[in-house]
Amino acid sequence: MLASGAGTNLQAILDRVHGHEGVEVVAVGSDKPRAPALERAQTAGVATAAFPVERRADPTRGGPAIGAFTDRTARDEAMAAWLAERGVELVVLAGYMQLLSPGFLARFPQRVINVHPALLPAFPGIGAVEQALAHGVKVFGVTVHFVDEGVDTGAIILQRAVDLPEATQPETVRTALRPVEHELLCEAVRLIARDAVRLDPANPRRVLIAS
């Protein structure tokens, strides 16, 4: 799993899926060395590592942090190798706020998934909740999707709508969506672990789920 922040989606998977139905969280990486998500993983006995990118290359200005990478490609190559060494079969983005390089995705073809706080393809990218509020929507939602080289453009695995016709504040929406994120992400992991998820040969944008 990869996470950048508090790790509440990670915690949901640790609590509900880890150690059940053949699912094991074997590694958690982050672009933030102090991400609380890493502490959650360590508490659960899961291997962790941080892969920060530090672009300051001038030693007179401090230089890159120890162990930091100077660009995204190098970071993602090292991160992919670290995950592969631990036998990772599915990479779950749980609040990971960085785009993954094509090289990383090639190491895990159709094996990287993400949870997004909007009903894609509406409101991709950062600030999805704020985008939705600015458009005055009445129905919000959550999407779990495969990750491709675009920004939240991968094939959709699961979605759920949430009616919030009176919502005006981002935190109100996030609070309502958070448990839905946890439920859908955990369910997607279970389905993939059961080999119940595949792309429709007739339409690779469509995900088929076996009953």
Image (cartoon, grey):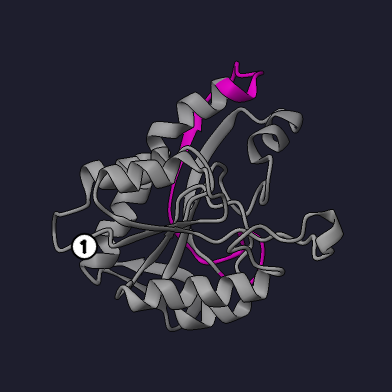
Identify the residue shown where x is 64% and y is 35%: 129
- Residue furthest toward the front? 60
Instruction: Please check the rendered image and state whether residue 154 is part of the magenta-colored stretch, yes or no.
Output: yes
Q: In which quadrant will I find the C terminus?
A: bottom left
Helix, strand, or loop for circle 1? loop
Residue 110 visible in the snapshot: no
In this rendering, position of residue 111 left or right of residue 211: right
Where is residue 13 drawn, in percent x and y?
Answer: 30, 47
Q: Is residue 131 visible?
A: yes
Return the residue nearer the eye: 123 or 56. 56
Magenta-drawn segment: 148-171
Q: Is residue 115 magenta?
A: no
Neighbor class of circle 1 (other Cα within 10 Å; few <14, some 14-19, many 20+) is few
Can you identify the residue that label 1 sits on?
211
* Residue 50 percent across, percent down from the top left: 50, 57
Seen in the picture, residue 123 relative to 66 is either above or below; the reply is above
Please tell me which residue lies in front, 158 or 177.
Answer: 177
Which is nearer the eye, 110 or 53?
Answer: 53
Residue 193 in the image, given as x and y percentages of width and height: 24, 66
Image vertical order of residue 139 relative to residue 96, above or below: above
Quadrant of the image for the N terminus? bottom left
